[in-house]
Image (tube, helix red, strand yellow):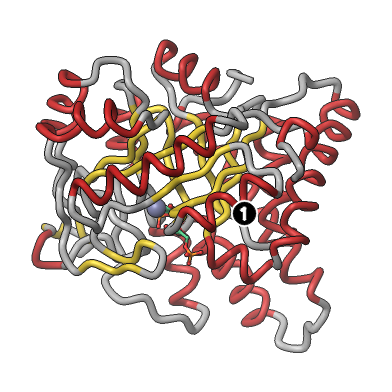
Amino acid sequence: MTHYKELGLVNTKELFKKAIDGQYAIPAYNFNNMEQLQAIIIACTETQSPVILQVSSGARKYANQTLLRYMGQGAVAMMKEFAKEKGLKEIPIVLHLDHGDSFALCKSCIETGFSSVMIDASHYPFEENVRITKEVVDYAHQYDVTVEGELGVLAGIEDEVSSKTTHYTKPEEVEEFVKKTGVDSLAISIGTSHGATKFKPEQCTRNADGILIPPELRFDILEEVEKRIPGFSIVLHGSSSVPIEAVRIIEECGGKLKDSVGIPEEQIRKATKSAVCKVNIDSDGRLWMTALIRKVFKEKPSEFDPRKYLGPARDALMEMYKHKNKNVLGSAGKA
Ligand code: G3H
Ligand code: 13P
Ligand code: ZN
């Protein structure tokens, strides 16, 4: 057993409390490789933002679970070195399992140094969701590891589970769920979804330039949830904005993305002014990384040094994370 405190990590407890009081959200950025991890750590240290490093079960398989554990430790070391070099304060780092789908996976992550886990049993009937989530909470809390549960299902792919339609969170269920499970935070479904096509074109309108404008998030559900569990930590998944600039570069450089549309950043900003204290962003990073790699390949077809295309991709990621921290989530300066 490697406890997360040995790795210099923190759980989400204090961070969420401060974020709710301060009306901002902690960024939860997914990573799978070294360049993504470097970009997240440097951007968050530079902007002095706390950060949640998210690992999905797919990422864990891709990067190898042992290597990932060292990457978590490496992230803290990298942050400390960078902060010292720049005369900045050290930032709090959480290592979080994203969309854990079983007790066994959550347990294994806790044993290898994760400081926070999500158990996503939201696709099961309510009582089963409660049972599975509580089992994880009871285990995790013995080690001071924080747990995120979920009520409601987002459209798109949630780990190996995919749903064609959104099942909004039922506000009348949240109080009982939180009480019975003992979770530390709750992910809710208010119209966000995973991936780069968050809405069907027929759900959107088009502006004068033909760009798809999505419908508003269901802030009424968020309000209702907050009334029932005042001050409780709420999480928003599927919060990428799918930046048109990145999509354009991808398409100009040979890529094809069908009907890409995200959540406008103003809506995420609005959500952070509530009890939403964790915002998950993965797709925006994937898009910027792909855009820059495609651009180098198009402009320099003879290039074959990975540093020459991964380097610009890493720089673009860094800019994006800084922008999110400063202008969307409000987490900059809160470390
Ligand atoms: O919620 C899903 C995240 O974007 C992770 O995706 O399971 O493909 O790593 P993944
Ligand atoms: P996006 O696909 O909108 O980036 O959402 C990521 C996410 O929710 C990870 O859990
Ligand atoms: Zn998610």
**In the picture provided, is 309 more to the left or to the right than 115?**
right
Q: Count how many numbered circles sit on residues in the image.
A: 1
Q: Residue furthest top?
A: 21
Q: Taking 136 as reference, is 201 above or below it? A: below
Q: Where is residue 47 in the image (x, y as percent from the top left)?
A: 65, 28
- Residue occupying the point 29% across, 55% down: 193
Q: Position of residue 294 (x, y in %)?
A: 59, 76
Looking at this view, is 327 or 176 the one in front? 176
Ligand 1 within 8 Å, label 1 CB: no
- Residue occupying the point 30% across, 76% down: 258
**In the picture provided, is 7 more to the left or to the right than 218?**
right
Which quadrant, please, contains the N terminus?
A: top right
**In the picture provided, is 192 more to the left or to the right than 134?**
left
- Circle 1 residues within 10 Å: few <14, some 14–19, many ≥20: few
**In the picture provided, is 152 more to the left or to the right than 258?**
left
Q: Taking 202 as reference, is 51 above or below it? A: above
Looking at this view, is 227 or 296 the one in front? 227
Q: Where is residue 175 in the image (x, y as percent from the top left)?
A: 20, 26
Which quadrant, please, contains the C terminus?
A: top right
In the figure, residue 234 lies in which quadrant?
top left
Q: What residue type is labelled 1?
A: Ser
- Residue occupying the point 60% across, 44% down: 53
Q: Taking 18 as reference, is 238 above or below it? A: below
- Residue occupying the point 27% across, 60% down: 198
- The residue where tag 1 is placed is 108
Looking at this view, is 296 or 289 the one in front? 289
Q: Where is residue 323 in the image (x, y as percent from the top left)?
A: 53, 38
